[in-house]
Image (cartoon, rainbow, N blue to C red):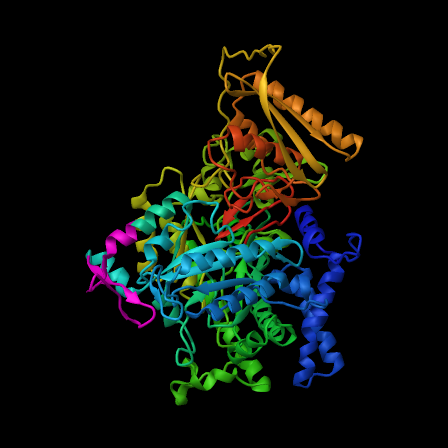
Amino acid sequence: MNLELTKNSIVVLERRYLIKDENGNVIESPEQLFHRVARFIAAPDAKYGAESDEIAKTAEQFFEMMASLEFLPNSPTLMNAGRPLGQLSACFVIPIEDSMESIFDAVKAAALIHKSGGGTGFSFSRLRPKDSKVATTSGVASGPISFMKVINSATEAVKQGGTRRGANMGVLRVDHPDIKEFISSKEDLSELTNFNISVCASDDFMRAVEKGEEFPIIDPQTNDLFFTDGKPLRLDAKEVFNSIVSQAWKTGEPGVIFLDRMNDGNPVRKIGLYESTNPCGEQPLLPYESCNLGSINLSKMLRAVVDSANPKSMYKYEVDWDKLKRTVWISVHFLDNVIEANKYPLPQIDIETKKNRKIGLGVMGWADMLFRLGIPYNSEQALELAEDVMSFIRKEGQSASRELAKTRGVFPNWKDSVFNENPQNAVRLRNSTITTIAPTGTISIIAGTSSGIEPAFALAYVRNVMDNTKLTELNPILEEKAKELGFYSEDFVQKLVERGSIQDFEDIPDDVKRIFVTSHDISPEWHIRMQAAFQKYTDNAVSKTINLPNSATREDIAAAYLLAYKLGCKGVTVYRDGCRRNQVLSVKKKEPAKEGIVRTVKRRPIVLKGITEKITTSFGNLYVTINMLDEKPFEVFAQIGKSGHSTMADTEAIGRLISLALRSGIDVNDIIDQLRGIGGASQVYGNGGLIKSIPDAIAKVLHNHFGNGKKPKPDMDIGNEVCPECQSKLEFVSGCVICPGCGYSQC
């Protein structure tokens, strides 16, 4: 099979998925990867009586589905299937009870899961509040936030498969006594850098918000009213809601999980209730459960038909429902096999996962499907198609699960599930849940399509390749349309890179502008309505970001949260453009050059006073000297010891260029922004943070002494604008930070 992989796909596969030898050389092709995964995931069929020729046939089906990029499983399956680690799940929830033993058992469990490539969710709602009495020690409790910091530090120290740090979800019930501290716990973005946080908002709380009433705070130790000064504590619901909104306006967090609604969709409520989700919020799980996710590429679920009414275009497209059905059935078979093939990081996870056999089949490429069909994302037609597509996937997914149950049996907790509440109409399923909408960060890059159900973030961007060459990438569907209608040119592409959207291009037809909309062209209401349309037919939840312009007000965010609740979403995450340091991804128009400004280089005085700081890098100790004039930085000298003549020369050159910029009147903060985050081949921890390269180290010294007065933020802060590995611009989608250039992610 001739694999149709984009340049980005190949970069991501080589960096993160293909097998390498002990020297880091890639020794596996993408085709071999898909064969490796297909064979490993088909093998469990033998447990249910399949002969070797049947297993080989199934493996070929799995291979063709992945190699054609019609379906891809979550990243741990692609990375680890058929390899010694063998851990295939992306999502886990670890319970935390109100004891030191339970807390540190959770820390250990999280470390093992992160090492294997998974992400973890925690509910801290059972922990006693800060400053409450601890009878066994006669001391006072430090509260949930302190233990979140413990897990955050442990996460910082553990790399997933040697490539990235793990991700966590921390949730707290809105009626916990420490809820106010939790809401503001990430106001300082240097804190809890390995956590997404969400408030679990109950139906009672949301009704109190709407009515402007107070709501009671619950003592997690007694599960009864929480007393302070001899009186039960009640908080103003609107005030707490507004604090959530205000913090989300500032930083994009916390998100909100509508926990009662999550549990309304819980198929085994008699067994247990959901308390937390995975890091991106789309997968609620019971304690020690895991879930295996996979996504169908909707842009591949189309067929071309002759468009006789449009002589300029030979083809138009329609949904290929037969192909979609076939893909759903094979995908359900694939994901059920993953449960058997998986090597779970803890024995409890193995046991609990197999009791309910949750799978999470979702979609990616939704925006590209709409582009092909000529349907605007922000239209009633798109909402109707969303419901049609997702209801079809769930219906066929359940049919496939019923078929598996005939030969493999129902999931063990089936007898206590909602599917057996009415014995006369019992539905015998192999899997307790079928559908989930995940972010699809790196797998959508491999598939060469849009992420999850998100609209396109930008229609063109610049990708930095390893030799620092910049490649401009244009959405291929827009490129086809531009060439077909005659408005394609290199100048058009460059302008689009700067603007991100085509809405203010005068020479593009209005019907094209109407179809090719980006995230910031779409009002928050349409974002939420789209999420709700998919949620209506999704067993678990939907991961999506409600993107807002920088000018959005707190009232806009409050309205978005309330609309999401009203329309039946199970959770909501907002991101106001530019609300975090440096902006995750912003496509801005170039400001016109200011006339009459001439920069002059100041002459150096004979004597200057300065400081010298030693900082550790992967090349050895770096000595950075900063000399000052009028208490401002005027020149920089940098010297690296015993690292080779080229490195020493490069270091000296960086210092000279910084000095020239400073003497020319360039603001030191602009210099810091340019240098900070530049990644190198070797990165080390030192001087209180991650040192990525010599330029990054110099930026940290400048920032420490002459920046905005604060210490540098840790490098895992998702406010960093550029990828720490390839320096491409980052995107914030579905609660994840994703690099479209190399697949780096923080989710």
Vertical order, 270 against 38 (above or below): below
Toward the viewer: 519 or 238? 238
Q: Quadrant for residue 16, please give it.
A: bottom right
Q: Quadrant of the C terminus?
A: bottom right
Rendering coords of residue 90 (x, y %) = 57, 64
Rendering coords of residue 466 (x, y %) = 71, 40
Toward the viewer: 580 or 660? 660
Vertical order, 150 against 290 (above or below): above
Rendering coords of residue 442 (x, y %) = 60, 53
223 inside magenta stretch? yes
Q: Residue at x 38, y 85 (%)?
A: 421
Furthest toward the bottom, the residue is 424
Q: Which residues are magenta?
A: 213-242
**Is residue 335 visible in the rendered structure shown here?**
yes
Vertical order, 291 against 463 (above or below): below
Toward the viewer: 140 or 708? 140
Q: Quadrant of the N terminus?
A: bottom right
Give the mark count.
0
Residue 735 shown left or right of residue 161 in the figure: left
Vertical order, 189 against 543 (above or below): above
184 inside magenta stretch? no
Rendering coords of residue 274 (x, y %) = 41, 70
**Is residue 71 visible in the rendered structure shown here?**
no
